[in-house]
Amino acid sequence: QVQLVESGGGSVQAGGSLRLSCAASANIFSINAMGWYRQAPGKQRDLVAAITSFGITNYADSVKGRFGISRDYAKNTVYLQMNSLKPEDTAVYYCNAVLTSTTAYWGQGTQVTVSS
């Protein structure tokens, strides 16, 4: 069992920045991939950014050049730096950890609201 605790959400004006944190209860060396997803009201949950244990990153086209995912092994934490935020980035952001092809965990979510 891996527990994920997100923090760093909040309200910001368009063009602003936020940094989300996801603290894992397990050593993230043992996690194959970690990522951030988001879900806006009435929409499906979509991948925003992910990073594998090899350091390979993947971003949704809508956030490329604005968001950056990184990890701190010493703190077992993954970050999502969000710059140049837009109102359409408003959503609940969820941290995800994939241990195997059949085992994954989710955080409780953190709200990000971007006003125009």
Image (spheres, helix red, strand yellow):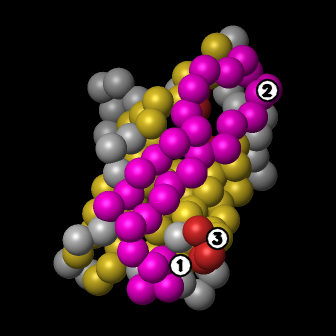
* Secondary-structure class at tag 1: strand
Residue placed under numbered mark 3 in the picture: 72
Name the residue: 41% across, 51% down. Answer: 5
Judge depth for marks 3 and 2 and give the one in front.
3
Q: CA distance from mark 3 to mark 2?
A: 26 Å
The residues colored magenta run 3-30
Classed neighbour count for the residue bearing mark 2: other residues with Cα under 10 Å, few (<14), some (14–19), many (≥20) = some
Name the amino acid, label 3.
Answer: Asp
* Dot label at residue 36: none
Q: Quadrant of the C terminus?
A: top right
Q: Is residue 65 magenta?
A: no
Q: Residue 102 location, x and y as percent?
A: 20, 78
Residue placed under numbered mark 2 in the picture: 15
Residue placed under numbered mark 1 in the picture: 52
**Would you say 110 lies left or right of 53 here?**
left
Name the residue: 60% across, 21% down. Answer: 11
Classed neighbour count for the residue bearing mark 1: other residues with Cα under 10 Å, few (<14), some (14–19), many (≥20) = some
Classed neighbour count for the residue bearing mark 3: other residues with Cα under 10 Å, few (<14), some (14–19), many (≥20) = few
Looking at marks 3 and 2 on the same chain, the residue that comes earlier in the sequence is marked by 2
